[in-house]
């Protein structure tokens, strides 16, 4: 995954660089978010599974992913939030260059307003993605085959992991290298709540994250890890595992059944918990505006 900002956001980052050099040395990446005296929360737009196609008329179950993401992007751009995260399946099916070209075009209204972080899902192609969304080694952790981003805020920390195993192979994998990195990172960073973001769902199907048990073994004793945010299933729900909150984000492109909404989630996060509001743009619209409040484990 990578993070992309416009020039004004980049200038803000460089202005803060001198004061955060120590954090950079420790974390590998420091992405500042705006903080005001009146509101210390981190306010984010959370999206998943946009499946943006090269062919703007491509549709599935009567839904047009290109148009849906265009609608969601306009809403996010006008939201006044601090940043946006998209948890994978950015491209329609096989991560074609034209998919990412359209994603970049549609994301521009958001990028002009706030940092945007993107994770990779099973329908993404890492090389094609990075050819369109250029990044630098300074913006990701030093893992050879995975792209990992740490984003920092005075109240909370976000880690965006890479669960892409192979393009158009439905299963996902964190993998040994990334698990070892995460273990080391968590041991060294215990002073703030940490939230994890990646694409794959957390069940025991072949289509889910294949090393989910190994991941939970790492994070369960690390009490600073409070929640995992993911997509993949095109469902929208909240569950827990050992008091770790598991938030399955709705798809932006299309749903798999009529019970689920299509849209994005507005999140207000701090060191004690999070407040979440669904912004439905299609599918089951009855859930539009529904709110959920979570308290982090101690």
Image (cartoon, rainbow, N blue to C red):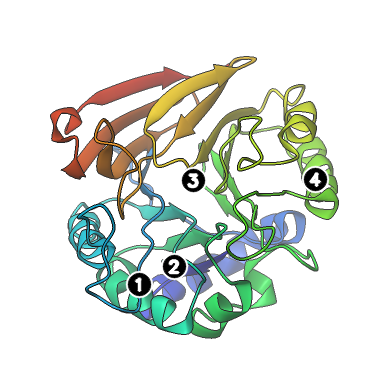
Q: Position of residue 20 (x, y in %)?
A: 62, 59
**Does residue 33 appear anywhere in the picture?**
no
Disc 2 from disc 4: Cα separation:
26 Å
Q: Which residue is mark 4?
A: 179
Above or below 282: residue 53: below
Mark carried by residue 53: 1
Mark carried by residue 232: 3
Give 266 or 298, whichever is nearer the viewer.
266
Q: Is residue 280 left or right of residue 159?
A: left
Disc 2 from disc 1: Cα separation:
6 Å
- The answer to whether marks 2 and 3 mark residues whose Cβ atoms lie closer than 8 Å is no
Disc 4 from disc 1: Cα separation:
32 Å
Q: Residues within 10 Å of mark 3 (few under 14, many from 20)?
A: many
Q: Residues within 10 Å of mark 2 (few under 14, many from 20)?
A: many
Mark carried by residue 91: 2
**Does residue 171 appear anywhere in the picture?**
yes
Whichever of callouts 1 and 3 sits on the residue coming sooner in the sequence is 1
Whichever of callouts 2 and 4 sits on the residue coming sooner in the sequence is 2
Q: In front: mark 4 or mark 3?
A: 3
Q: Residues within 10 Å of mark 1 (few under 14, many from 20)?
A: many
Q: Is residue 248 left or right of residue 202?
A: left
Whichever of callouts 4 and 1 sits on the residue coming sooner in the sequence is 1
- The answer to whether marks 4 and 1 mark residues whose Cβ atoms lie closer than 8 Å is no
Q: Position of residue 252 (x, y in %)?
A: 31, 51
Q: Residue at x 75, y 61 (%)?
A: 25
Q: Position of residue 69 (x, y in %)?
A: 26, 61
- The answer to whether marks 2 and 1 mark residues whose Cβ atoms lie closer than 8 Å is yes
Q: Is residue 26 left or right of residue 83?
A: right
Element class at badge 3: loop
Q: Position of residue 152 (x, y in %)?
A: 56, 49
């Amino acid at each position: 995954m990578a993070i992309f900002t416009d020039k004004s956001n980049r200038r803000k980052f460089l202005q803060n660089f001198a004061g955060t050099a120590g954090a950079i040395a420790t974390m590998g990446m420091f992405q500042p978010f705006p903080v005001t005296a009146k509101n210390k929360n981190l306010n984010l737009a959370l999206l998943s599974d946009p499946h943006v196609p090269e062919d703007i008329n491509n549709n599935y179950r009567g839904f047009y992913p290109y148009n849906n993401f265009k609608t969601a992007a306009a809403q996010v751009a006008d939201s006044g939030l601090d940043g946006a995260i998209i948890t994978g399946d950015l491209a329609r099916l096989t991560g074609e260059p034209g998919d990412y070209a359209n994603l970049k075009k549609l994301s521009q209204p958001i990028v002009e307003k706030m940092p945007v972080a993107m994770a990779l899902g099973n329908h993404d192609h890492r090389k094609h993605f990075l050819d369109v969304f250029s990044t630098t080694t300074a913006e990701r952790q030093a893992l050879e085959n995975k792209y990992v981003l740490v984003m920092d805020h005075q109240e909370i920390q976000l880690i965006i992991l890479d669960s892409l195993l192979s393009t158009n192979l439905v299963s996902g994998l964190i993998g040994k290298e990334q698990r070892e990195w995460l273990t080391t990172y968590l041991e060294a960073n215990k002073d703030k709540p940490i939230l994890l973001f990646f694409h794959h769902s957390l069940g025991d199907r072949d289509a889910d994250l294949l090393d989910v048990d190994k991941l939970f073994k790492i994070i369960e004793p690390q009490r600073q890890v409070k929640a995992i945010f993911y997509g993949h299933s095109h469902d929208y729900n909240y569950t827990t595992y050992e008091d770790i909150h598991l938030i399955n984000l709705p798809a932006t492109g299309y749903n798999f059944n009529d019970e689920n909404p299509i849209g994005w989630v507005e999140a207000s996060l701090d060191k004690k918990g999070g407040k979440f509001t669904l912004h439905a743009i299609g599918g089951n619209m009855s859930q539009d505006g529904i709110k959920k409040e979570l308290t982090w484990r101690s």
